[in-house]
Image (cartoon, helix red, strand yellow):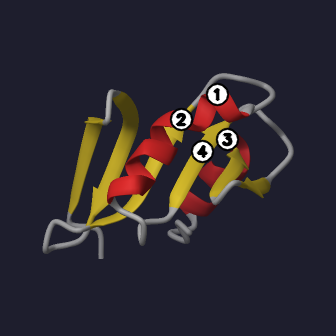
């Protein structure tokens, strides 16, 4: 169950747009939201910095990139697909 949502976390000088935590405050999902139509490595630096501190937490990049994939441990998901999962209460 999602207990808490936190936004704009800074890790090692990099930002993560949202961190969803459980009831104990442990992060269960880090989310970066990008308007880019093609996600490149530079778009994922905040998530990679976050991962250094919370290596067990899944990383998610939501964007306009229509090619869903995993890149360097980050799940990249097209915004429409993300919203379908969210509305179906099946958030990764």
Horizontally, is 61 left or right of 3 in the view? right
Q: Of discs 1 and 3, which sits in the foreground? A: 1
In the picture, the disc for residue 42 is 1
The kind of secondary structure element at disc 1 is helix
Mark 1 to mark 3: distance in Å?
A: 19 Å
Mark 1 to mark 4: distance in Å?
A: 12 Å
The kind of secondary structure element at disc 3 is helix
Horizontally, is 82 left or right of 32 in the view? right
What is the x, y in percent for residue 21?
A: 26, 63
Mark 2 to mark 3: distance in Å?
A: 19 Å
Q: Mark 2 — residue?
A: 45
Q: Of discs 1 and 4, which sits in the foreground? A: 1
Residue at 50% x, 39% y is 32
Q: Mark 3 — residue?
A: 79
Q: Mark 4 — residue?
A: 61
Q: Of discs 4 and 2, which sits in the foreground? A: 2
In the picture, the disc for residue 63 is none
Residue at 24% x, 45% y is 6
Mark 1 to mark 2: distance in Å?
A: 6 Å
- Within 10 Å of disc 2 (Cα), the crowding (few <14, some 14-19, many 20+) is some
- Within 10 Å of disc 4 (Cα), the crowding (few <14, some 14-19, many 20+) is many
Q: Quadrant of residue 54?
A: bottom left
- Within 10 Å of disc 1 (Cα), the crowding (few <14, some 14-19, many 20+) is few
């Amino acid at each position: 169950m999602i207990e808490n949502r936190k936004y704009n976390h800074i890790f090692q000088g990099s930002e993560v747009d949202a961190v969803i935590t459980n009831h104990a405050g442990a992060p269960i999902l880090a989310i970066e939201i990008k308007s880019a139509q093609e996600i490149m490595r530079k778009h994922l630096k905040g998530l990679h910095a976050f991962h250094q501190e919370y290596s067990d937490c899944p990383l998610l990049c939501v964007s306009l990139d229509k090619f869903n994939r995993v890149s360097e441990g980050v799940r990249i998901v097209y915004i429409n697909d993300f919203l379908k999962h969210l509305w179906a209460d099946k958030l990764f």
